[in-house]
């Protein structure tokens, strides 16, 4: 009897919820399912090196490493947005047209700026009814797991910005070289958390602004300058790019070696959908009763 009651409640909730039930995304009537697969990552502790330029008593210092924990599940795309998916947004008049170059439809879209990525996320939000957004740098590091590069870069006095840029460039450029041509989805493998092509040859935009910060005696960092015209970009190394740049090889890299390509993957906010499903289940219980 208990099993039958549970099944009736589940069926009623499914009928009320429509496409939300069974773990699918909360969609508007007649709208197809999400075009991309996602994975839900439960909160856990992880090591995070603070992004941006850090100083102590006015002198450059290595950014500290923190032990962090996300405050809720993180639902994120298992792969980067593809050229075909971005082209659909362009065709709908919702995304800026870009020079796609030789990338095939089944490969990550590259040559996109932060602004282009935000436009695509806004379109996906309108299309699906679920909020899509770029990850923060902290979320990206958490999802990247063992693929996140936590190497501390050489500390160089910012009073000589040209030398600081060159030292960082030399450090990053000395890493293993790989083809800059976008590869088919999955070419660079899957990390421990089920994400494909993390730290391959496509760097990913995050929504984190560039920050200059002071490391206090207490160990806390205090932001002194926040520049949201420059965003954190993540891949084989962390770097910082002007938000309108599409091709990093033409300039706009705020420090170090420019990324080979600029692409992105999105976070999907599921909390609202989860709350709605729970409410529908409670309503079904009231309607059906205990029998």
Image (cartoon, grey):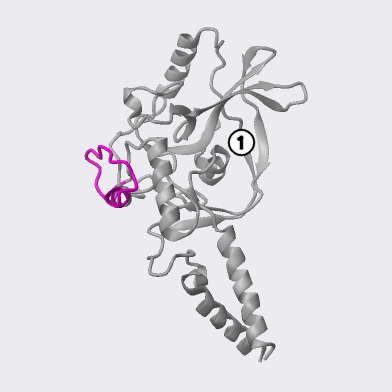
Residue 174 makes an appearance in the image? no
Residue 112 figure quarter: top left
The residue wearing badge 1 is: 48
Estimate the x, y position of residue 224 in percent, counting from the top left. Answer: 64, 21
Left or right side of 79 for 289: right
Return the residue found at the far front.
93
- Measured along the vertical axis of the image, is residue 196 above or below residue 279? above
Return the residue found at the far top.
160
Estimate the x, y position of residue 243 in percent, counting from the top left. Answer: 43, 31
- Measured along the vertical axis of the image, is residue 110 above or below residue 24? above
Q: Residue at x 54, y 82 (%)?
A: 11
Residue 11 makes an appearance in the image? yes
Estimate the x, y position of residue 268 in percent, counting from the top left. Answer: 50, 53
Count how many numbered circles sit on residues in the image: 1
Q: Main secondary structure of the magenta part?
A: loop
Mark 1 packing: few (<14 Cα in 10 Å), some, or many (20+)? Answer: many
Range of the magenta residues?
87-107
Q: Residue at x 64, y 31 (%)?
A: 65
Left or right side of 152 for 117: left
- Measured along the vertical axis of the image, is residue 268 above or below residue 257? below
Residue 36 figure quarter: bottom left
């Amino acid at each position: 009897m208990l099993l039958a009651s549970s099944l009736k409640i589940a069926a009623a909730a499914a009928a009320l919820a429509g496409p939300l039930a069974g773990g699918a995304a909360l969609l508007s009537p007649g709208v197809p399912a999400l075009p991309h697969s996602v994975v839900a990552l439960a909160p856990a502790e992880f090591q995070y090196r603070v992004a941006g330029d850090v100083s102590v008593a006015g002198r450059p210092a290595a950014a500290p490493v923190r032990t962090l924990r996300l405050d809720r599940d993180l639902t994120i795309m298992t792969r980067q947005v593809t050229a075909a998916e971005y082209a659909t947004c362009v065709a709908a008049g919702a995304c800026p047209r870009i020079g796609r170059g030789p990338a095939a439809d089944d490969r990550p879209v590259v040559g996109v700026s932060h602004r282009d990525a935000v436009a695509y996320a806004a379109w996906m939000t309108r299309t699906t009814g679920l909020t899509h957004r770029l990850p923060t740098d902290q979320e990206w590091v958490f999802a990247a797991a063992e693929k996140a590069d936590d190497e501390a870069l050489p500390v160089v006095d910012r009073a000589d910005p040209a030398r600081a840029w060159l030292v960082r460039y030399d450090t990053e450029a000395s890493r293993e070289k790989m083809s800059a041509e976008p590869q088919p989805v999955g070419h660079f493998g899957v990390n421990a958390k089920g994400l494909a092509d993390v730290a391959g040859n496509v760097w990913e935009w995050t929504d984190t602004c560039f920050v200059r910060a002071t490391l206090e005696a207490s160990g806390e960092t205090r932001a002194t300058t926040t520049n949201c015209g420059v965003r954190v970009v993540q891949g084989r190394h962390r770097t910082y790019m002007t938000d309108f740049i599409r091709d990093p090889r033409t300039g706009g890299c705020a420090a170090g070696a420019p990324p080979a390509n600029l692409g992105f993957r999105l976070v999907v906010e599921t909390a609202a959908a989860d709350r709605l499903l729970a409410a529908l289940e409670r309503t079904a219980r009231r309607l059906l009763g205990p029998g």
